[in-house]
Image (cartoon, rainbow, N blue to C red):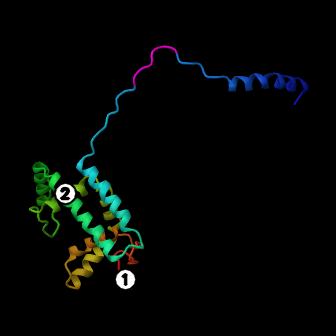
């Protein structure tokens, strides 16, 4: 640094320090009241997902006893039962029934059960992306699995059990140490 640069720095340094330590100016004018907060009540679906997420987190604890795991399962069932009662929507149910009639699944899905309709709606809305990823991941396996199941006398639609077990994730490991797509235990 040159001699002139040092002189300038020595002169400016006290000014900058004084400026940084100076009290802030008081605001002028009239203070406005804060805008009222808009609080949106959570929907039944949001409440269900929050509850299920909390319960899933509890269920993943490896130190959970059998009784504690059973309690988590009971609480999940209760949350779903309460959700079913809150979300009875006749028009949505009719749309689901119409879509199921158009689909050629090879097996019947009972539409007179509100829990079934609730799950169909969840998989079509909030869980759509997860469900799509699971089916995409299982795409390479499904045709061959169906062939093997048919050859062995097992209903081919049973391949979709792998969605529930692992979302077709061949590397899945449960808290009980069940592994693979079908969650087998050694």
Marks 2/1 in contact by CB < 8 Å: the verdict is no
Image quarter where the C terminus lies is bottom left
Mark 1 packing: few (<14 Cα in 10 Å), some, or many (20+)?
few
| Residue identified by numbered label 2 | 82
Q: Magenta: predominant secondary structure element?
A: loop
**30 inside magenta stretch:** yes
Q: How many marks?
A: 2
- Is residue 36 or residue 98 the one in the foreground? 36
Q: Residue at x 35, y 74 (%)?
A: 181
Provide the secondary structure element on which disc 2 rests.
helix
Image quarter where the N terminus lies is top right
Q: Quadrant of residue 5?
A: top right
Mark 2 packing: few (<14 Cα in 10 Å), some, or many (20+)?
few
Numbered range of the magenta stretch: 28-33
The label shown at residue 185 is 1
Q: Position of residue 117 (x, y in %)?
A: 16, 59
Query: Is residue 128 something one can see in this rendering?
Result: no
């Amino acid at each position: 640094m040159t001699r002139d640069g040092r002189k300038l720095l020595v002169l400016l340094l006290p000014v900058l320090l004084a400026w940084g330590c100076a009290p802030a100016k008081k605001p002028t004018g009239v203070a406005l009241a804060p805008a009222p907060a808009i609080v949106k009540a959570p929907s039944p679906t949001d409440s269900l997902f929050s509850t299920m997420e909390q319960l899933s987190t509890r269920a993943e604890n490896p130190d959970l006893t059998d009784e504690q795991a059973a309690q988590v399962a009971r609480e999940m069932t209760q949350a779903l039962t309460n959700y079913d009662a809150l979300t009875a929507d006749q028009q949505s149910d009719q749309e689901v029934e119409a879509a199921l009639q158009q689909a050629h699944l090879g097996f019947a899905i009972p539409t007179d059960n509100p829990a079934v309709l609730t799950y169909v709606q969840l998989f079509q809305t909030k869980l759509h992306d997860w469900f799509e990823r699971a089916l995409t991941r299982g795409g390479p396996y499904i045709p061959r699995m169906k062939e093997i199941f048919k050859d062995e006398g097992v209903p081919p639609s049973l391949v979709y059990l792998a969605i529930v077990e692992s979302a077709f994730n061949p590397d899945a490991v449960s808290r009980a140490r069940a592994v693979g797509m079908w969650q087998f235990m050694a």
